[in-house]
Amino acid sequence: MGNTQLARLANLPPSTVSRLTDSLVQLGYLRVNSESGAYYLTPKNLRLGYPVLANLPIGGRAYRALDRLTESTGMTSTLATRDDLHMAFVAVARGRSATGVPLAVGGRLPVSVSAAGLAYVRALQEPLRARVIASVCRDLSQRGYSADSFERKATDPPTDYVVAVGRWQEEIGGVATTVVAGGELYALTLVAHSRELEEPDISERLVPAMLEARETIAD
């Protein structure tokens, strides 16, 4: 994207955006496409995220657990935590088949449309749970979407796992549970194409494998 698009998305004056992007180019975080004038990120940005991920107290055991979970199910497995109104992936093991859903560390999905988000919110303690639900519902309403479905699902009592199919993309779904590790709450999710998420396979094969991974990751 160029300065005009960035200014529109950020709701900032074009002059402000121009100064910011110029500074980021000078610092080496952005480069400019000489033909289109669009900016793109440089590898230097990886330095911002990897120290955070490396310092997570669950790093090693989380990846080992996700690798085993993906190996046993064939599906992409992820560990995510809340970043405001999104769930941010802190660890990912992508399914090795051609149909594996391509997610990456650092990627984010809205709390409102992901199995990870629903599982995470249900597991929160009050009054934080109510505040997060209210924030998500307010954001959905401001963007012209109905918050009824999310609010109804988010206020359900906590369960061992949550299934959400077609909320993010019609052909994609997830099965999620939560795990506390290093004093932090995370959502552990299997992500797959919707056709792969059907009963009795979910309850008889996927959930037991996911709960076993949860035990490995948990304190």
Image (spheres, grey):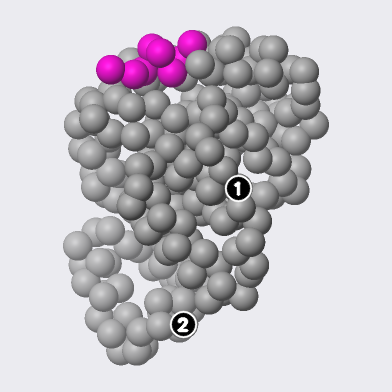
The residue singled out by tag 2 in the image is: 8
Given the image, on which type of amino acid does mark 1 rest? Answer: Lys
Residue 75 position in % (x across, y down): 62, 23
Relative to 136, is 41 on the left or the right? left
Q: Position of residue 168 (x, y in %)?
A: 64, 50
Vertical relation: 179 (above or below) 185: above
x then y, percent, for residue 164: 65, 40
From the image, state whether disc 2 or disc 1 is nearer to you: 1
Rendered position, 216 above or below 26: above
Can residue 73 be seen in the rendering of this structure?
A: yes
Q: CA distance from mark 2 to mark 1?
A: 33 Å
Is tag 2's residue or tag 1's residue first in the polypeptide sequence? 2
When the figure is inspected, residue 72 is found, relative to residue 57, above or below; the finding is above
Give 1 or 63, whichever is nearer the viewer.
63
Residue 214 counted in the magenta span: yes
Disc 2 on helix, strand or loop? Answer: helix
Q: Is residue 156 left or right of residue 13?
A: right
Q: Amino acid at mark 2?
A: Arg
Q: In the image, what residue occupies the spot 63% across and 17% down?
A: 206
- The residue where tag 1 is placed is 153
- Secondary structure character of the magenta stretch overall: helix
